[in-house]
Image: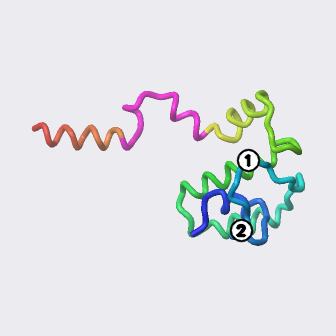
Amino acid sequence: THSIQDKALYLEGDPNPSAAPTSTLAPRKMPKSISISKQLASIKALRKCSDLEKAIATTALIFRNSSDSDGKLEKATATNLLQTQFRNFTEPCEYSRGSWPSAKLEESALTRHQN
């Protein structure tokens, strides 16, 4: 099995994800832009992955496309990404736990056990 980092590197267009370095201490110098066709091919390759793996790979791609040549994001850029690209992820976090569908299922299960 490949690690999530390997999958993210594959998503970025690395032709051989198993040969990807496992250390994150030194950022790799990679070309800034990745062709749309490579991005689409990578998305197709992720079809059999879990939703979490897809989300992490997508996050890595967005980060990579938005970072500077050293692989860093400025605070303003990171804030903008959170407000635009990751809005669907961050908005549910602003609501109370009771508004989540899974929380309602848990509450109804607890109510049945208490009666």
Who's the residue at 76% across and 28% down the image? 75
Q: Quadrant of residue 30?
A: bottom right
Who's the residue at 13% across and 37% down the image? 114
Of residues 40 and 75, which is closer to you in this image? 75
Q: Count residues near mark 2 (Cα–Cα under 10 Å), then give few for <14, some for 14-19, many for 20+.
A: some
Q: In the rendered structure, does residue 90 fall within the stretch colored magenta?
A: yes
Q: In the rendered structure, does residue 20 fall within the stretch colored magenta?
A: no
Is label 1 in a helix, a strand or a loop? loop
**Residue 59 vs residue 30: left or right?**
left
Contact between labelled residues 2 and 1, with CB atoms less than 8 Å apart? no
Q: Quadrant of residue 85?
A: top right
Who's the residue at 85% across and 58% down the image? 34
Where is mark 1, residue-wise? 25
Magenta residues, dominant SS class = helix
Indicate the amino acid at tag 2: Pro
**Residue 95 vs residue 105: left or right?**
right
Expressed as whole percent of the image width and height from the top left, the position of residue 32 reads 88, 52
Who's the residue at 79% across and 64% down the image? 13
Q: Write down the region rendered in magenta.
A: 88-102
Of residues 84 and 33, which is closer to you in this image? 33
Q: Count residues near mark 1 (Cα–Cα under 10 Å), then give few for <14, some for 14-19, many for 20+.
A: few
Expressed as whole percent of the image width and height from the top left, the position of residue 78 reads 74, 33
Indicate the amino acid at tag 1: Leu
Where is mark 2, residue-wise? 17
Label 1 vs label 2: CA separation?
Answer: 18 Å
- Examine the rendered structure and indicate whether residue 23 appears above or below residue 49: above
